[in-house]
Amino acid sequence: MTRSSAPGKIYLFGEHAVVYGEPAVPCAIERRARVGVEPRDDATLRVHSDDLSLDGFTVEYAGSTDGKPDIDVAESLVDAAMGYVDEAIAQVREVTGEPDAGFDVTIESDIPLGAGLGSSAAVVVAAVDAATRALGVELSTAELAERAYQTELAVQEGQASRADTFCSATGGAVRVEGSDCRAIDAPDLPLVIGFDGGAGDTGALVAGVRQLRDEYSFAADTVASIGDIVRQGETALADGDVAELGRLMDFNHGLLSALGVSGRSLDSMVWAAREAGALGAKLTGAGGGGCIVALDPTPETETALRYLPGCEDVFRAELADEGVRRLE
Ligand code: MEV
C-alpha cells in the first residue's frame, strides 16, 4: 500500500473573500488526513474509512450510489467526502495517463469533516499524492497543489480558491491571492480551536456569498474590506504583533458575519473566547458551523470553551511546517 498524509489548516484571515481574488492567509496545523492506496486490477474505486466523521463509522463505497451502504450519521458529509475522492482519482487518471486505473483507498483522518479545518483539501492532497505514486508518477508539490485545486474546483462547481489545497500541499503559513500562492513567515501563534460538533456546506455557503455580493453593494464592499484586513494582517504577522493580529481577526469575524456565514454556535464560541481574554477570535473556513480559532497564550480561552454549552471539543493547534508527507 502507498500512503501519504496531509495537514488541515485554519484561516488566520481571508476566507470567502479569497474566492473573489482578495488575498488570504491560511496556516497548516498538525491535524492530518492519511490516505492509503492499493491499485486494483479493474477500474473500480473502493473507499474505506473508519473515522471520516467524529462519530466514527465504517463506510464502504464502490463509487456509485448503488454500492453505498445505509449510513445514518452525517450521510451528506460522507457523500461530499466521497465526491472529493472520486474527483481526486479522476485527476490521478488524467495526470498519469491511466484512464482505467482502479484503487482500494483507505482514509484515516483526525480532521472533522466540513468543520473549517480543511478536511477535504487534506484528503484530496494525500489521495492524489498516494495514488499517483502508486502508479509510479512523482508530482512536484506545485503539480500536486494544482491537481488538488482542480479537484476542489470540479466538486464545488467552479467556485474554489487555491488557498486550502496549496496550504495543505506545502504546509506552513501561506499567502494566496488569485493564482499567486507562496509561503510566508509566521511567528509561533497561540492558536486555540473550538469546535461546535457541526459542519457547513462549503459549496452552498460560497454560493450564498456570491448571491449576496451580486445583489447588494455592501457585500461587495465587505469582501473588499476583508482584503484590506488581510493586508494589514500580513504587516502584523511580519512584525510579530500578536495583539494587532487578534484585533484584526475580530474585525474579520464581524465582516464574515455580515456576509451571513457565521451562526449562533460560532458566534457564541467567539464571544466566549473574547470574554475569556483571547486577543482575538473568528470563525475559520466556510462557516455555517464547525470551528473558530482564537489567539490566547493563557489557558483561559480553553477553559471557557470547555465549559461552554454547544462547544464539543477544544484544543491547541500547532503550526504544521510540513505539508504532504510520504508515509512508509
Ligand atoms: C473554505 O475552506 C474556504 C473558502 O474561502 C472557499 C475557498 O477558498 O475555496 C470559503
Image: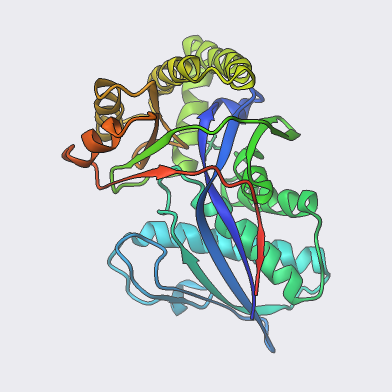
Question: Toward the viewer: 151 or 245?
Answer: 245
Residue occupying the point 77% across, 73% down: 99
Quadrant of the rendered structure where residue 21 is?
A: top right
Quadrant of the rendered structure where residue 131 is?
A: bottom right
Left or right side of 322 for 53: left
Identity of the residue furthest to the bottom in this view = 41
> Where residue 188 appears, x then y in whole percent?
54, 33
Question: Toward the viewer: 273 or 68?
Answer: 273
- The chosen color scheme is rainbow
> Where residue 271 appears, x then y in whole percent?
26, 24
Quadrant of the image where one finds ligand 1: top right
> Where residue 296 appears, x then y in whole percent?
38, 28
In the rendered image, the vertical position of residue 272 relative to residue 105, given as above or below: above
> Where residue 292 appears, x then y in whole percent?
37, 35
Question: Toward the viewer: 188 or 307?
Answer: 188
Quarter that holds the C terminus: bottom right
Left or right side of 52 for 94: right
Identity of the residue furthest to the front in this view = 298
